[in-house]
Image: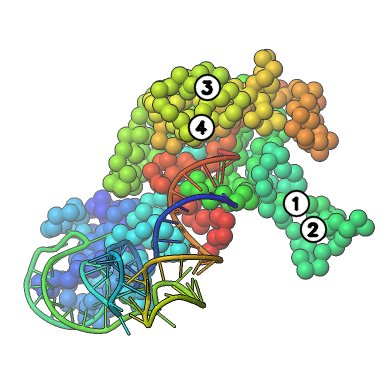
Amino acid sequence: MLVSVKQALAGQPAVGTKVEVRGWVRTRRDSKAGISFVAVSDGGCHDAIQLVVPNTLPNYASEVLHLTAGASISSIGTLVASQGKGQAFEIQADSVTVFGLVDDPETYPIQPKQHSLEFLREQGHLRPRTNTFGAVARVRHHAAQAIHRFFHEEGFFWVNTPIITAADAEGAGQMFRVSTLDMTNLPKTEAGKIDYSKDFFGKETFLTVSGQLNVEAYCLALSKVYTFGPTFRAENSNTTRHLAEFWMIEPEIAFANLNDDADLAERFLKYVFKAILNERMDDMAFFEKAQKGVIERLDKFIGSSFERIEYTAAIEILKNAKKKFEYAPEWGKDLQTEHERYLTEEHVGRPVVVMNYPEQIKAFYMRMNEDGRTVAAMDVLAPGIGEIIGGSQREERLDLLDARMRKMNLEPSHYNWYRDLRRYGSVPHAGFGLGFERLIVYLCGLANIRDAIPYPRVPGWAQF
RNA sequence: UCCUUGAUAGCUCAGCUGGUAGAGCAGGCGACUGUUAAUCGCCGGGUCGUAGGUUCGAGUCCUACUCAGGGAGCCA
């Protein structure tokens, strides 16, 4: 019977049964005792199963001895308890069928050795065969499943907001243009500008930078909703934390305030972290070897309650801190990464929610507080990474929303459908945004976000 | 975009005050072995990122460019 490598490693279905496994060779070791040991991985779990291949097989000399890392095979044999150390079970092979050998083993990029992550980024089509990227892919899948499961269990509906949009959701952020116009022969208006009425949608269109505004409309109908999909930013950011194409999770809850939002963020993160520790301990153990403390970090995160601090209080804490900062903390300015790390790592030593920021540094849709100078915004800061979630209570009062838009030089009439939501049965509501890849970076202890997504897109790089 | 570091064999790297290139791994061959990214021996493998310049002579010094890493800003 056909079994997965994962099953075989667990001795399933039972020692003594004839099983078939299929996968890719990791290593081959020959013994003159008349056998070869072939480690085979099918990617379904971290470890490879060991095949014990006797030299009596008809294709032993012609094929088995030419197996190198990356070759694809299937093998039928008997599942047995291993005589060697290092694995509990192995397969005593009766046959080995080769699907594809490696053309030129010397230049096959994925060798049984440590590769640099930079090198592997240039091998985007082969890097999923490595331990690291196999593990990242599996953790990513389980995280995505846990996220959907969390929201589903809490009564949320998944809303698929559009990828192609006409407006800039936050009035900030460079967008990728979507157009079918002939770039070598652009239609012009009488004023000499590009005539987008001739374009596919009859107007200027872009790839979305956030699904938030769209999902708010569904929130004010279905009460609890979330988005989980791709997002695009054309910023020229060359950092370990930015991608031009990334996946974002944005829940939105009606009849809720900022405290409800922070509660949701806390339940959400703990649920997902718990799921990964329960479901992917094999891969987490592997990451632990590369980055000591990643498991403990998640354990502590799950076990601690989030500290909540007012922005104004946070500034005071930073001003009174003995630590010297490169940028002096000052009320009215955004917290620097060094400030965020200090608050969460040194001052409280567990996750922190900073709440109620000065209005001038936050987006137009965030709700004005009673004090008239702060808005109901929050950032969740985590030890070891800093900001992991940003959210807010939304401004549900039309007059105040319009006032803030004008203050930020946005034309309210361009947002009429969004303003309608405040005219017809408006309610207090709140939500937050989370970059999925940043979550993966944190879970796996990765250093660069380009390794948290299968095919990273960043300025100057769109290979594969 | 700014600052900074780097680019030498398929991969990871060494190569001093300039004197025309080395190791480990991988690959091939052999030895040995129920082996664990095995071990040992031998062999093949390089336009030193690109283009100029200085010099009798450049991997090494200078200039420009390209690409990459790290940091910053922006943010998720």
Q: From the image, which quarter does the N terminus of chain A lie in?
A: bottom left
Whole-angstrom CA distance, mark 1 to mark 3, is: 40 Å
> Badge 3 local density, few (<14 within 10 Å), some, or many (20+)?
many
Whole-angstrom CA distance, mark 4 to mark 2, is: 47 Å
Give the labeled residue for mark 2. Answer: A200
Q: Say yes or no: labels 1 and 4 on the same chain.
A: yes
Q: Amino acid at mark 4?
A: Tyr
Expressed as whole percent of the image width and height from the top left, the position of residue A164 reads 70, 50
* Residue A205: mark in rendering: 1
Q: Secondary structure at mark 1?
A: strand
Q: Secondary structure at mark 3?
A: helix
Which mark lies nearer to you, 2 or 3?
Answer: 3
Give the labeled residue for mark 4. Answer: A327
2 or 3: tag closer to the N-terminus: 2
Whole-angstrom CA distance, mark 4 to mark 3, is: 12 Å
4 or 2: tag closer to the N-terminus: 2
